[in-house]
Image (cartoon, rainbow, N blue to C red):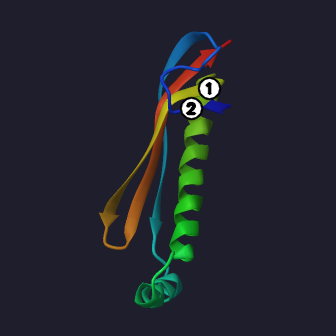
């Protein structure tokens, strides 16, 4: 499955637009990770626990979007985007969306 953020695939001919596909996950903070993050804010630097958590959440959202595209018969997704929002204190949604297409 090819996934691109552009509206086309260079060198490929889009034969069929299959529609919007999306995938999302809601990720909450973990109390143990929160404690480590709190300590890290004192000394500065990357909060690796949150970086890892968000990378995993993004991958879940992309995988779910890909599954939806496969169900539609797509072999590519164009104009893919990622967004995040807070759904409640301590929990965020990550959503991946794009247009499922068939290309040759």
Where does the N terminus fall, quadrant-wise?
top right
Secondary structure under tag 1 reads strand
Q: Position of residue 76 (x, y in %)?
A: 62, 26
What residue is disc 1 on? 76
Looking at the image, residue 89 sits to the left or right of residue 67; the answer is left
Residue at screen point 46% across, 89% down? 43
Name the residue at 59% across, 52% down.
59
Residue wearing tag 2 = 4
- Quote the CA–CA distance across marks 2 and 1: 8 Å
Q: Is residue 4 above or below residue 54?
A: above
**In which quadrant is the C terminus drawn?**
top right
Q: Is 69 displayed left or right of 21 in the figure?
A: right
Using a 10 Å C-alpha cutoff, classify the residue at mark 2 as few (fewer than 14 neighbours), some (14 to 19) or many (20 or more).
Answer: some
Figure check: 6 above or below 66 = above
Q: Residue at x 41, y 57 (%)?
A: 93
77 up-or-down from 104: above or below:
below
Classify residue 88 by image quadrant: bottom left
x then y, percent, for residue 67:
62, 38
Marks 2,1: beta carbons within 8 A: yes
- Displayed quadrant of residue 56: bottom right
């Amino acid at each position: 499955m090819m996934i691109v953020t552009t509206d086309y695939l260079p060198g490929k001919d889009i034969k069929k637009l299959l529609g919007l596909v999306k995938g999302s996950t809601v990720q909450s903070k973990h109390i143990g990770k929160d404690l480590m993050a709190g300590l890290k804010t004192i000394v500065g630097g990357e909060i690796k626990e949150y970086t890892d958590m968000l990378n995993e959440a993004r991958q879940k959202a992309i995988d779910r979007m890909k599954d939806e595209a496969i169900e539609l018969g797509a072999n590519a997704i164009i104009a893919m985007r990622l967004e995040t929002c807070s759904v409640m204190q301590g929990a965020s949604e990550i959503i991946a969306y794009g247009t499922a297409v068939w290309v040759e």
